Image (cartoon, grey):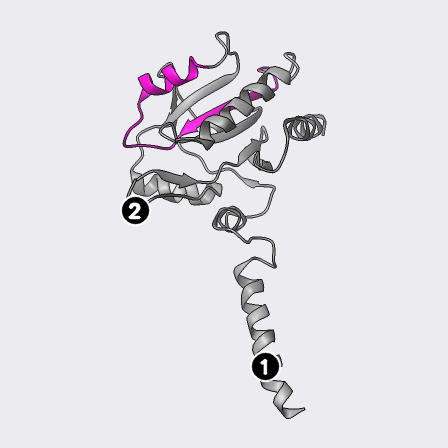
Amino acid sequence: MKNFIPPFVALVICIAVIWKWTYGFSAFTVFSYTLRDAGTTPRSFPDIQLINQDSIVFHIKDKKKYTLVNFVYLNCPNVCHKVNNRLEEIYNKIDSNIVPSKLELVTVSFDLKNDNIKKIKNYRNHFSSNIQGWSFALPYQISQKDFDTYFKQVGIWAKAAPKSNVINHSIYLFLISPENKVIKVFDPAREDNATIINEVYTCLKS
């Protein structure tokens, strides 16, 4: 019996440490941990100035409507463009009476070093020629340090790979309420378009 106690205690300690590090076994990747560390929903969506493809400076909190926000890395070799292609499908399937009167989409580039207004405008033009209620934007007048802090507050993890400098990052979609609260976070890697659209409709109705 005595020989059983030390390994049992060690097991309990290991489980306790893992429980703490994974927020009660709810975050097992750096992506999910960063999202969980930002806080549970509903929570305030952090605010910064953004500038869109038409050089208009705005704040998401000033829209006073539901906003579906995602962050894109334009030099991404793969996943970002797939997510925005998904967003285009979602955009086209949402009732036109909802977008843009009750809901807008905002895609924010987070590559402060390489992206500019011309680049995001050209990228936007790859999508539907008549986009209403979907802005492509850049952070405006913010340092890299402050933007990194903002990113953590949002719940997005991003880090450049040592050799290639390609930025690895999470791809969550954030549904922001008219009161500037994060009320829903979607993972397009695990949720299909129909599920996301139905959840958006449910939030808008409530």
Tell me where residue 73 sits by quadrant. top left
Q: How crowded is the residue under tag 1: few (<14 C-alpha within 10 Å), some, or many (20+)?
A: few
Residue for point 57% across, 15% down: 100
Residue 153's disc is: none
**45 with respect to 147 (left or right):** right
Q: What stretch is highlighted in magenta?
A: 100-126
Residue 150, percent from left and from top: 41, 41
Q: In this view, does 4 lie above or below 45?
A: below
- Image coordinates of residue 187 in percent, x first then y, are 57, 37
For the residue pair 189 and 38, the one nearer the viewer reads as 189
Amino acid type, label 2: Pro
Q: Name the residue under label 1.
A: 7
Q: Residue at x 46, y 44 (%)?
A: 153
Mark 2 lies on residue: 162
Amino acid type at circle 1 is Pro
The quarter in which the N terminus is drawn is bottom right
Q: Is residue 19 left or right of residue 143?
A: right
Viewer-proximal residue, 193 or 71?
A: 193
